[in-house]
Amino acid sequence: MSVDDQISNKSNNQPFHKILEKNTSRRTVLKGGLAAAATTFFATGAGTVLARNHFGDKGDSFFKRKKGGLIGFKAVSVADGNGAMPTISEDYEYQVLIPWGEPIQPYGPSFTWPPISSHQEQQIGIGHDGMTFFPIKKGKKGYGIDKKRGHRAQNSHGLLAINHEFGQNNHVLGKSQPGSLEDVLVSQHAHGVSVIEIKNCGGSWMRVQSDMNRRIHVNTPVAFSGPVADHELLQTPDGNIPLGTVNNCSNGQTPWGTYLTCEENFNGYFGATGAWTATEEQERYGFSSSGFGYGWEKFDTRFDLSNPNFKNEENRFGWVVEIDPMNPDSVPTKRTALGRVKHEGVAITVGKGGRVVAYMGDDQRFDYIYKFVSSGNWRRMRAQGINPLDEGTLYVAKFNDDGSGNWLELSIDNPVLAARFSDQAELLTYTRIAADLLGATPMDRPEWTTVAPNGDVYCTLTNNSKRIASNAANPLIPNPDGHIIKWHDTRKHTGTQFEWEIFLLSEDTHGTEDTLSSPDGILADPDGRLFIQTDGGQKDGLNNQMLVADTLTGEIRRLFTGVTKDEITGITMTPDRRTMFINTQHPGNGDPSLTNFPAPVDGVSIPRDATIVITKKDGGVIGS
Ligand code: FEO
Ligand code: CA
Ligand code: CA
Ligand code: CA
């Protein structure tokens, strides 16, 4: 949700092809073997090798084939997936954890509606989205080991770092516009991130009293690091220190144990109370005088685009932010080398030579997919006191019609970019404009990315009802149901070329167990499963949902359906993969006449965003 309905990419990167009408020749834009892979995906049976790859990796032979496939559970049927409460496969069970408004400490202020700001900053935020489970770190042996309980503890005790993407004023405040600074503060404190220590006690998960429980929100001090950190584009005439993170959508985690939270539709929180005209740069990021209608600018001048004292404040948002969940005193740090876009999420992997690689989608119609590669081995960089996300190369993706692709370097050394920007810092602050100039491929709203253990990278392209010209990687005109694209990079994620194919067109799913639309959250597991979450109108009256795909056979089954008018997003597991955490976001769109999920509290029946803990009844791996 929190969709920016505009199209702010006015560059001419669109028509690779003549305008093609849907249902005539869209398949023909997929060439050769790629066409075969895309069109036979659901027609073929078990054992079909989907991933061709010409780079000497193992491809799908990486995975062990299991007789009968990877999915053993009974699917939730279409008929069962449309209620006011969630439905889960009969082979699974679920528990509700940390709904919006629950105090982060057991004896903190309990939920009231609407909240007051001094309480909300001590309570779980709203808009649960991306999250990561960090096994608790105790004892001398290091990561994931609890001294008292040994290795097994890591599957029953940890920190959950969780994004609070957004909450509409009607849901949070009970009115469409704030009437005071206090109202704005409630809204601001409901956004951001929570870090919460959780434990499985007798089969039931609960949050516990902890020095590590923490709220980070729109007024929490933050720092900048990387190429833009000291640049004038991040300074305001007012001289105010950098504060806060907002519209925290999806997430990532680093090999060194930190959490990454991604700022997506940050433009929507700014507005103008006086005369204001958007600059070219502000226009490209979708700023407008009324934003998304939060009204923060009316009582908090920091978000007023027409206030000259806060010129550049908006440049402080749109970044990937690193948080050390194990250190409650750490300052959230915006890693500017990863560029400034509407960051949906960040999928981190380790590539050739131990370089850390980050794949990222910019979620807006006709925006792009990015990759960052650190300049060196991440362990060596850290040993030298350098954060691996501070030094490296940022690329944007160009998907060629023949199934090849190129990562285009976003560097001030490129004369085309040097003619537009004065330095690398300015280029990174306006990453979208730099990508326009290089001719990146405009995509159908890139949402999450995930890296499978065989090196395949998947990205959900959620939908694009406004596409009127196709390219091979975005072949549908329009594309109301979305698709999933898959690619494989050269040089173990660090090269500048890739091969791509379309993994799934949502419109090709139409069975009772697999039908889906608007794929969004996605996670590849070590066995070859792909968890797919949805956000958008589903077919056949279904609520939003989570499905499991077997990438070896092409089979897809529905594991979970949410609550009416919600979105299913956020996904993380314990190391043994026997417990999964997902979220229902904006159940009932906040309307208590549609649902009271998870349950009324003290007479308050407003529905509340919440985390859902999923386990298999037989104790098996989630998805099996
Ligand atoms: Fe926050 Fe694009 O979903
Ligand atoms: Ca400003
Ligand atoms: Ca999303
Ligand atoms: Ca979405």
Image: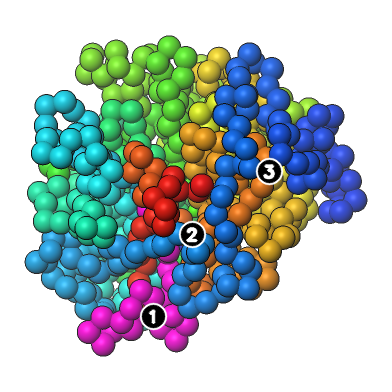
- In percent of width and height, residue 355 lies at 41, 18
Q: Position of residue 537 (x, y in %)?
A: 61, 67
Left/right of residue 153 with respect to residue 506 in the rendered view: left
Residue drawn at the location 18% of the way across and 35% of the way down: 150
Q: Residues within 10 Å of mark 3 (few under 14, many from 20)?
A: many
Image colouring = rainbow
Give the CA separation, mark 2 to mark 1. 25 Å
Marks 2 and 1: which is nearer the front?
2
Q: Which amino acid type corresponds to the residue marked 1 in the rendered image?
A: Asn
The residue tagged 3 is 554
Looking at the image, can residue 582 be seen? Answer: no
Q: Secondary structure at mark 3?
A: loop
Distance between the alpha carbons at the discs numbered 1 and 3: 36 Å
The residue that disc 1 covers is 596
Residue 293 in the image: x percent, y percent?
43, 69
Of marks 1 and 3, which one's residue comes earlier in the chain? 3
Residue shown at the point (46%, 19%) measured from the top left: 351
The reply to whether callout 1 and callout 3 are in contact (CB within 8 Å) is no
Question: Is the residue marked by circle 2 packed among few (<14), some (14-19), or many (20+) residues within 10 Å?
Answer: some
**Direction from residue 24 to residue 456 in the image, left or right:** left
At 53% from the left and 58% from the top, the residue drawn is 559
Magenta-drawn segment: 580-606
The amino acid marked with disc number 3 is: Gly
Whichever of callouts 2 and 1 sits on the residue coming sooner in the sequence is 2
Residue pointed to by mark 2: 91
What separation in Å lies between label 2 and label 3 (alpha carbons)?
A: 21 Å
Q: Type of residue at label 2?
A: Asp
Q: Which badge, 2 or 3, comes first in the chain's sequence?
A: 2
Q: Residues within 10 Å of mark 1 (few under 14, many from 20)?
A: many
